[in-house]
């Protein structure tokens, strides 16, 4: 029944508008030979528009809001009292059109958002004897044994009946899978990341963590102050002024018709038409840019935000692990270690396995076939590659070799996870994985500041050290780590005191904060259903730079709407003056108001125009994509510099000297040609696009420093006997310096230039 009522409300506005237009048109047809019948039609149109308008005004007054509809009601009622039937019908048409536009925009936005929702699990696989029975989640009771397969969400809080790994990022923000031993408690909402596992329910769905987070989101939404819309802000000043002018005109002229004429010309149609047109146009433009708004209020609010709070995992970071380094054991190469690891991991469903396989593919490697592959819980993947037994996985002990201890230390400092590769029971190397920062994150932060945001904060459930590194790299004003859902809500409420806020997130744990913020923005592709339900806007393709697009578009639409409304009301004030002095009859006032409406609507349609930004040519885009791909191909060459530095010790060993020679060779034959090609081909093209020859000077300086350090490295190797023992300190400093410059320079190019090529063309 409720669904029927909702559907009826959705179509009530358009139905009223159709009826009002039909009655007004019928009156126009009848007027030439049946003036009485025409008057009846126009009066009916006025009454049809008056009834819902009165309902809205009463609701607004109960909520202590004084909106634009109040003047419209007075104008409609006034035309009925003095018999100005045509004027009333014209006001009715304008009023109905404005509300129909608003209703249309909201209905379309809700439809677009509903299509994106990932449904939370409604069923669970409960073990009954030796069988599995599919039952609704609401029927699960404590004590039931539930089978959770890889990739499935744990439906209720439970205890593990075996060792397992889970992706808990939706609840905690921790991007890497977490291993839980038998007997450990797992919360509803986490995802099985390894093998299938049985769990024993310890709570119903209603009493579990997931439901608790949803209740917190509902409470946060209920306590959030509503956004005051543009039309209501202007109407709050315009309404008393119009009433005073109408009263004075009626009293001084002793003619109530003049008061009605004033009210007709004062009917806030620029508010009722121009503002919805601008907001609807802005919503359409935002949708084309990949940001779907729930309704016009969301767009108006987003255009006025001053504080942003962003979740870390999956929002400013990719939300899934990626290979950031490969460390081979002595006698192995990075390519060979990655090939063997990818050969075994290719058949694994583990979250880390996909990262290893993707890294091998990106490096152009072709892993050999693996046979006998199977997963050992707690150990990793095992298999046979080329007749040799291979084990790929994490382990508690790192071994006693110096290079292994160095890997463990490096992983801890870099907040990375080490996946070890063993061949025939000997460690061949380690693959380091970490949740990488999105390339477009830093640019997005800068664009948000340019759009008027004065404070940007990162909230995360992740570790403090990791959060501080990411926040410092991207230029956040503050960071709060180890956040629970309640902590995020508390921080959002604290920031709400200082200005209108926007919260951006994608996890279940972000849903309450999204609801508490002035505007909640969810990443729709991978965002949880809870986050999407709580949000006011959705970024369709999970690109964080769409947030900056949305803010810029919303600010522009809001600016256009405000300009249209102010210009329209200014013209209406002039018309009111004419009506007050008897120079405009009610019908003439309605005609003048129509002309004003047409002008402001045309002005409002400017919100459909795209926001101006740099658009690269196809040739430049292809260059960026080419050099971006080369960056991935050069991963092994760059890693060789770090490995050579790590291998240095005094006195020098043959292995260390060989590592240094390999690093120098790769720099000369692979990295420097890449840098020279950028100087000759890419940078001139970018300078032309930016219209500034100085725009790439900083990057060119990076190239010069890379080449200088490479030459210095070559001088160390120039002697017949190679580097001397007394030069080890300087050689190590050269290598570590080269490694640092390479990492910084490559990151700068990817952030400043290559991220531009990733933007899909927008209409």
Image: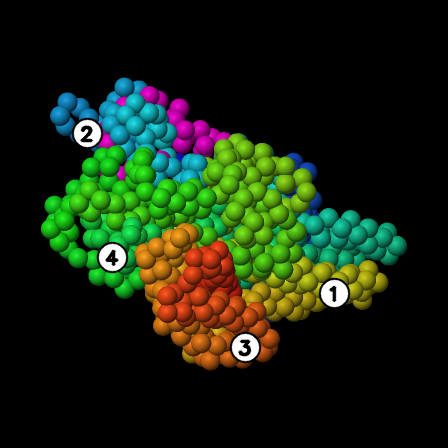
Q: Is residue 669 magenta?
A: no
- Is residue 542 found left or right of 46 in the rendered image? left
Q: Earlier in the sequence, mark 4 or mark 3?
A: 4
**Label 4: few (<14), some or many (≥20) within 10 Å?**
some
Q: Is residue 718 left or right of residue 260?
A: left
Q: Check disc 4 and report its element: helix, strand or loop.
A: helix
Say whether disc 2 or disc 1 marks the residue closer to the N-terminus.
2
Please tell me whether residue 211 belongs to the stretch shown in magenta.
yes
User: Residue drawn 24% across and 27% down?
Assistant: 162
Mark 3 vs mark 2, foreground winner is: 3
Query: In terms of sequence position, does the residue under pointer 3 or pointer 2 come before the other?
Result: 2
Q: Residues within 10 Å of mark 3 (few under 14, many from 20)?
A: some
Quarter residue 693 falls in:
bottom right
Percent across and percent down for residue 650 are: 42, 52
Disc 1, SS:
helix
- From the viewer's side, name the closer residue of 494 and 178: 178
Instruction: Report, in whole angstroms, how far the alpha carbon at label 3 lies from the one at label 2.
Output: 64 Å
Q: Which residue is mark 3?
A: 687
Q: Position of residue 620 (x, y in %)?
A: 45, 76
Front tag of 2 and 4 = 4
Residue at the spot 48% in from the left edge and 74% down from the top edge: 616
Residue 652 visible? The answer is yes
Q: Say which residue label 2 marks.
A: 133
**Magenta residues, as a range?**
190-216
Marks 2 and 1, Cα distance to the nearest angstrom? 70 Å
């Amino acid at each position: 029944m409720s669904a029927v009522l909702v559907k009826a409300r959705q179509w009530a506005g358009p139905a009223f508008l159709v009826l009002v237009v039909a009655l007004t048109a019928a009156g126009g047809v009848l007027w030439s030979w049946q003036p009485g019948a025409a008057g009846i039609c126009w009066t009916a149109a006025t009454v049809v528009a008056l009834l819902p308008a009165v309902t809205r005004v009463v609701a607004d007054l109960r909520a202590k809001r004084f909106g634009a509809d109040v003047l419209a009601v007075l104008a409609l009622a006034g035309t009925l009292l003095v018999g100005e039937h045509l004027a009333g019908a014209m006001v009715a048409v304008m009023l109905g059109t404005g509300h129909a536009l608003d209703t249309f925009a909201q209905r379309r936005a809700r439809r677009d958002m509903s299509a994106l929702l990932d449904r939370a699990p409604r069923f669970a696989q409960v073990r009954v004897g030796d069988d599995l029975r599919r039952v609704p989640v609401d029927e699960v009771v404590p004590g039931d044994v539930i089978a959770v397969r890889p990739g499935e969400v744990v439906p209720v809080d439970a205890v593990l009946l075996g060792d397992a790994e889970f992706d808990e990022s939706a609840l905690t923000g921790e991007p890497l899978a977490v291993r839980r031993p038998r007997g450990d408690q797992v919360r509803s909402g986490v995802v099985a990341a390894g093998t299938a596992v049985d769990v024993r329910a310890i709570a119903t769905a209603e009493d579990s963590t997931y439901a608790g987070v949803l209740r917190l989101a509902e409470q946060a939404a209920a306590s959030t102050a509503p956004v005051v819309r543009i039309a209501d802000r202007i109407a709050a000043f315009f309404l008393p002024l119009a009433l005073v002018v109408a009263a004075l005109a009626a009293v001084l002229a002793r003619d109530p018709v003049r008061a009605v004429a004033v009210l007709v010309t004062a009917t806030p149609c620029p508010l009722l038409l121009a503002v919805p047109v601008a907001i609807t146009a802005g919503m359409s433009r935002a949708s084309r840019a990949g940001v779907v708004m729930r309704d016009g209020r969301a767009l108006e609010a987003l255009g006025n935000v001053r504080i942003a709070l962003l979740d870390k995992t999956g929002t400013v970071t990719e939300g899934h692990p990626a290979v950031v380094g490969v460390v081979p054991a002595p006698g192995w190469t990075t390519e060979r270690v990655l090939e063997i690891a990818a050969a075994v991991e290719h058949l694994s469903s583990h979250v880390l396995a996909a990262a290893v396989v993707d890294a091998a593919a990106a490096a152009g490697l072709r892993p050999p076939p693996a046979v006998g592959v199977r997963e050992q819980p707690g150990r990793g993947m095992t298999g046979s590659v080329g007749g040799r037994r291979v084990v790929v996985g994490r382990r508690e002990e790192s071994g006693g070799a110096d290079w292994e201890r160095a890997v463990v230390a490096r992983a801890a400092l870099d907040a990375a996870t080490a996946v070890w590769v063993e061949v025939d029971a000997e460690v061949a190397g380690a693959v380091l994985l970490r949740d990488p920062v999105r390339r477009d994150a830093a640019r997005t932060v800068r664009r948000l500041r340019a759009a008027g945001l004065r404070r940007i904060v990162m909230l995360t459930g992740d570790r403090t050290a990791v959060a501080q590194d990411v926040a410092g790299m991207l230029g956040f004003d503050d960071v709060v780590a180890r956040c629970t859902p309640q902590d995020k809500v508390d921080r959002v409420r604290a920031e709400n005191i200082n200005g209108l806020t926007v919260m951006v997130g994608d996890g279940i744990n972000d849903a309450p904060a999204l609801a508490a913020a002035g505007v909640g923005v969810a990443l729709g592709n991978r965002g949880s259903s809870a986050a999407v339900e709580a949000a006011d806007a959705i970024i369709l393709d999970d690109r964080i730079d769409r947030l900056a697009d949305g803010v810029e578009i919303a600010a522009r639409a809001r600016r256009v709407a405000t300009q249209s409304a102010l210009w329209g009301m200014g013209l209406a004030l002039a018309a009111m003056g004419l009506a007050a002095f008897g120079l405009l009859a009610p019908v003439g006032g309605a005609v003048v108001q129509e002309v004003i409406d047409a002008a402001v609507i045309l002005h409002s349609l400017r919100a459909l125009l795209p926001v101006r930004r740099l658009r690269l040519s196809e040739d430049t885009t292809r260059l960026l994509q080419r050099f971006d791909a080369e960056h991935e191909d050069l991963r092994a060459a760059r890693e060789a510099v770090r490995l050579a530095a790590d291998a240095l010790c005094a006195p020098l060993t043959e292995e260390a000297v060989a590592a240094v020679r390999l690093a120098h060779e790769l720099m000369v034959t692979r990295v420097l040609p890449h840098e020279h090609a950028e100087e000759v081909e890419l940078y001139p093209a970018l300078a032309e696009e930016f219209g500034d020859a100085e725009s790439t000077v900083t990057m060119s300086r990076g190239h010069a420093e890379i080449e200088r350090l490479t030459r210095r490295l070559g001088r160390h190797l120039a002697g017949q006997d190679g580097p001397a023992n007394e030069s080890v300190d300087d050689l190590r400093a050269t290598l570590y310096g080269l490694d640092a410059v390479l990492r910084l320079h490559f990151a700068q190019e990817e952030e400043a230039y290559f991220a531009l090529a990733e933007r899909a063309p927008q209409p």
